[in-house]
């Protein structure tokens, strides 16, 4: 008996340690980012850093303004949401409510497959197909642009939006729908006026998850967006995102440039934290 | 109870093994770290050295900046940089030794009829003074400038040779030589730059001032768009015996053939 109790305690302890490892990693990353991100912001000045329009990190007189990166990330994410959410949401409604089981299983495995494709593959296909395509269709000198990044991001966020929306829609009690149908509503009316409102916080969470995925993506975006630190004032402008600003210069950086890259990472981290907080808010509301 | 003791002993053993890995001092090995552009040449040299002496050789392709930092922090024996050391790096106690010269090819799409540009014209194109290929004898197509990211050795080399530092109006800044070549091969209006050794048939290398980028023209200096490959070491600390042996080997005339075979021109 005593032996069993001891075993329980030991196992409990092991699990606790494993859990603490995860928490420790988060803390370590947070602390490291803050410590390495603050010095450059101090040196450059918070206002000049966040609202400076020019980034020239290796110039003789370096400029470290990241407003163009912030706006690009915001516009790029917004654009991806604008395309990805309607498509993803409708797909989810179809798969959850309308599709026959056979179609549903085939399409759901296709969606899972889409989620499993590495981002470098998205980038490669974007570079070889989408970028030349945009150049020819819109008759612009070069296709690497904000638009190309938006399209790639929209496709990349589809799986998370679809999967989460399906989960939310599947969880709507069948009685709600039965009642609506019994009152004479057509199936489509029922899905959009009963099922979707009942699942709305789950769907909102899906959108927020999509935002998080889009704003954090680096590899695919780096290969199609052109990476020049321009202000994103046109869809066909070559632009640089917060993520690509960090990853494209990190390998060769030194001195204040490297510190400034950590500061960009810190800004990105704060964005992601904000998005996570929003996500938690929606998820909590759903369980209540 | 017995089971538990066994489990704990296994855990202790595992931890001590991990700790052992961290502190183990590898003797008779050479670690290099740095420029991705130098991969081909340093890989060939390392292989030959390993075959001759049996001393193990490692190369970590991280980029010039990272390689220089790695030497400084003592994480490798020799750093590899495809640009000259900056003054702040030299004053931080580092010494650079030129191993070889690498020509930077100016590449365009194979459909582009333009075959030769002068350094001045290239500079004008990259600073935005010339924006259409028809101005330099090509088709009526807008010029699309493809370059590398800030801090890249190739970009630094290209911009310092053409005197266009901080003035290039890039349309795309890509992070690898391969990406530059792919992008130029996809766009008939594109111009880019890449290490001569890595240029493929999918793009056309231009002659500069009438000189084609070949080993002979880079060696005699008539092809002007070229940059050094630098070995970075600590000024105040001696190399390990194995690293010194490697350093002597690759800077000796015995290594010339291997360096040449890798598409760059030996400095010694």
Image (tube, coloured by chain):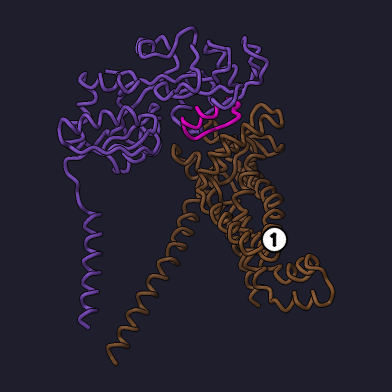
Chain colours: A brown, B purple
The answer to which quarter of the image holds residue B66 is top left
Q: Tell whether position B173 is magenta.
A: yes
Circle 1 SS class? helix
Say above or below: A151 vs A16: above
Q: Tell whether position A281 is magenta.
A: no
Q: Is residue A6 left or right of residue A70?
A: left
Is residue A271 in sight in this rendering? no
Nearest to the observer: residue A208 or residue B19: A208
**Residue for point 32% across, 80% down:** A10
First to last magenta residue range: B168-184
Q: Which residue is mark 1?
A: A94
Residue A251 drawn at (x, y percent):
44, 39
Q: Is residue A26 left or right of residue A46?
A: left
User: Which quarter shows the N terminus of chain A?
Assistant: bottom left
Residue A173 drawn at (x, y percent):
69, 76
**Residue for point 42% across, 21% down:** B196
């Amino acid at each position: 008996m005593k032996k069993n109790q001891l075993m329980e305690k030991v196992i409990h302890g092991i699990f606790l340690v494993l859990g603490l490892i995860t928490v420790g990693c988060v803390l370590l990353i947070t602390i490291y980012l803050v410590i390495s991100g603050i010095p450059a912001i101090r040196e450059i000045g918070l206002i000049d850093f966040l609202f400076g329009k020019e980034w020239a990190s290796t110039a003789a007189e370096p400029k470290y303004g990241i407003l163009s990166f912030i706006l690009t990330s915001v516009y790029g994410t917004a654009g991806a949401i604008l395309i990805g959410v309607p498509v993803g949401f409708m797909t989810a409604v179809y798969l959850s409510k309308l599709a026959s089981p056979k179609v549903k299983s085939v399409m759901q495995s296709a969606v899972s497959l889409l989620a499993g494709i590495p981002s470098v593959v998205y980038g490669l296909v974007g570079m070889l197909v989408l970028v030349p395509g945009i150049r020819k269709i819109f008759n612009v000198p070069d296709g690497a642009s904000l638009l190309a990044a938006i399209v790639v991001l929209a496709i990349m966020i589809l799986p998370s939006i679809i999967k989460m929306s399906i989960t939310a829609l599947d969880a709507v009690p069948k009685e709600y729908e039965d009642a609506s149908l019994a009152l004479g509503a057509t199936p489509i009316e029922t899905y959009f006026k009963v099922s979707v409102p009942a699942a709305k916080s789950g769907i909102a969470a899906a959108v927020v998850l999509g935002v998080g995925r889009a704003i954090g993506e680096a590899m695919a975006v780096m290969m199609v967006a052109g990476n020049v630190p321009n202000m994103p004032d046109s869809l066909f402008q070559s632009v640089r995102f917060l993520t690509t600003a960090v990853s494209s210069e990190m390998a060769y950086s030194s001195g204040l440039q490297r510190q400034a890259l950590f500061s960009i990472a810190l800004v990105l981290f704060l964005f992601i934290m904000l998005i996570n907080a929003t996500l938690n808010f929606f998820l909590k509301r759903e369980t209540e | 109870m017995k089971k538990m003791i066994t489990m704990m002993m296994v855990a202790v053993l595992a931890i001590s093994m991990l700790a052992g890995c961290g502190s183990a001092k590898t003797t008779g090995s050479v670690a290099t770290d740095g420029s991705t552009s130098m991969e081909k040449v340093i890989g060939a040299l390392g292989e030959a050295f390993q075959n001759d002496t049996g001393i193990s050789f490692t190369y970590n392709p991280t980029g010039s900046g990272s390689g220089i930092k790695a030497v400084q922090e003592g994480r490798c024996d020799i750093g590899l940089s495809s640009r000259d050391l900056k003054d702040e790096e030299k004053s931080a106690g580092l010494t650079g030794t030129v191993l070889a010269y690498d020509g930077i090819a100016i590449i365009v799409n194979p459909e582009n009829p333009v075959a030769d540009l002068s350094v001045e014209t290239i500079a004008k194109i990259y600073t935005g003074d010339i924006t259409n290929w028809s101005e330099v004898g090509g088709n009526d197509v807008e010029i699309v400038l493809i370059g590398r990211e800030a801090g890249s050795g190739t970009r630094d080399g290209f911009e310092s040779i053409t005197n266009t530092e901080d003035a290039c109006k890039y349309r795309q800044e890509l992070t690898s030589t391969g990406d530059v070549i792919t992008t130029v091969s996809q766009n008939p209006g594109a111009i880019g730059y890449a290490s001569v050794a890595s240029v493929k048939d999918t793009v056309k290398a231009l002659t500069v001032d009438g000189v084609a980028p070949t080993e002979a023209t880079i060696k005699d200096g008539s092809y002007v768009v070229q940059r050094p490959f630098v070995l970075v070491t600590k000024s105040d600390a001696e190399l390990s015996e194995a690293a010194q042996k490697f350093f002597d080997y690759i800077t000796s005339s015995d290594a010339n053939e291997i360096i040449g075979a890798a598409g760059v021109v030996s400095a010694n």
